[in-house]
Image (cartoon, rainbow, N blue to C red):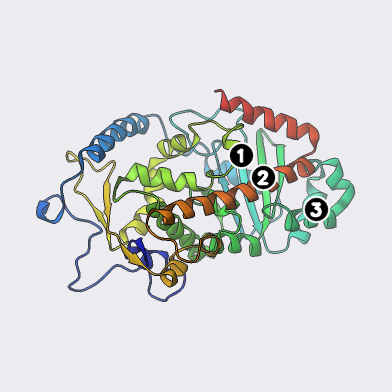
Amino acid sequence: GVMASSGWRRLAGAVRPGLGRRRQGGVRNNSSISSNTPHASPVLPPDVRTRCLAQMETLQAAQGAGPPLLVNTDLVQNVCSNFPSATLSFAYGSGVFQQNATARAAKTMIDFIFCVDNPRDWHTENLQRNPQHYSTLARLGGTKFICNLQENFGAGVYFNTLVQCGPYLIKYGVVSRKILVDDLSTWRTLYLAGRLHKPVHLISGKEEFQDVLQRNLRFAVTVACMQLPPAFTEFDLYRAIAGLSYSGDLRMIVGENPRKIENIVMGNWTGFRTLYRPVVEQHADLQTFPPTDGHDLNRVFLQKQEKCSGEQLAEILPYCVQARLSPAPTGDSLATQIQQAVASIVRQGSTTQTLKGILTAGVSKTVTYSWEKLKKTFA
């Protein structure tokens, strides 16, 4: 067997009915121990306490920097009205959410994803409505070429970038329902599943996709906890989760702000708490320490560890992570192998998708887009 939290089996909820539920009856519920029951909580390790307080000071400073959501509902609805209908649509990224107290610049690009049932029909209509959004190669190739490029290369997403939509500069990706659901369920590329580990501005389709979206969040908490020490802060957890989809991305070396992950968490702390608190509270063996110095801004967690069989790992890990592990990982090698598996998935998906972007955007837009990304590295 291997060391893992027994709560992970309830947390992942991907296979067995009833998983992910809080224990009932006479079994202790560790998910929320109040400050008036100090005997129920072990002593907080000094290094964790120090880190918690330091993170809390930074978070308190970030809280007063303005609203995390930088766009309003009318704006995104106006943008979406220019396109064929989508089954699920959302806006994300630094053009939508504040990152570490930085206001959105007037020309910051707003990113959208449109999930559609029939990509061929969607692109056919969009080519009629917005032909200027597509590269010359795509317009010449037509719908069949576009759909083939979308479905069979990279992460299954077709992007049009640096598109002027009214007064706004946007980038939008189109993905089929089949590929999105598969990525959320198995982490085949983590390209969209990783984006949905972080708060996004859901525009439509939330109810229909609720179950698979929640499964993706449970997987994220599971994998993050497996890479964290027995005691860790709430900020540590969200930083680990936000970092999953960047772990093998070559663009993090050149092309992104080196502090991007911390900025994402700092800039939208409330969004992360809203997204993950229900998932964390269902984790029966993840114990919450009483608020540090009476403050609940940055909670501290203690996770229990016990042996977990290979069959149980198959239940709690996404299929494409679990398939990359050795037959019987033990001890610290489990966390290392999981980290390497996630990085391998991200590297493959992001690299092929980036190369595909040269074809979908065209050379001129690719150079412009890459230059803007490169400037962030040295910002």
Q: Which badge, 3 or 1, comes first in the chain's sequence? A: 3
Residue shown at the point (17%, 73%) measured from the top left: 26
Point 45% across, 65% down: residue = 328
Instruction: Write down the quadrant of residue 54 in the picture.
Output: top left
Graded by Cα atoms within 10 Å as few (under 14), some (14 to 19) or many (20 or more), the crowding at tag 2 reads some
Gap between marks 2 and 1 measured at Cα: 7 Å
Residue picked out by circle 3: 146
Where residue 359 sits in the image (x, y, percent)?
79, 43
Instruction: Name which residue type carries label 2.
Output: Thr
- Give above or below for 236 relative to 40: above
Horizontal relation, residue 200 to residue 26: left or right: right
Which of label 3 and label 2 is nearer to you? 2
Residue 17, above or below 274? below
Residue that label 1 marks: 250
* Inter-mark Cα distance, 3 to 2: 19 Å
Q: Looking at the image, do the residues carrying marks 3 and 2 touch, with CB atoms under 8 Å apart?
A: no
Mark 3 is on which residue type?
Ile
C-alpha gap between disc 3 and disc 1? 25 Å
Relative vertical location of residue 366 with respect to residue 360 in this rendering, above or below? above
Q: Can residue 271 be seen in the rendering of this structure? A: no
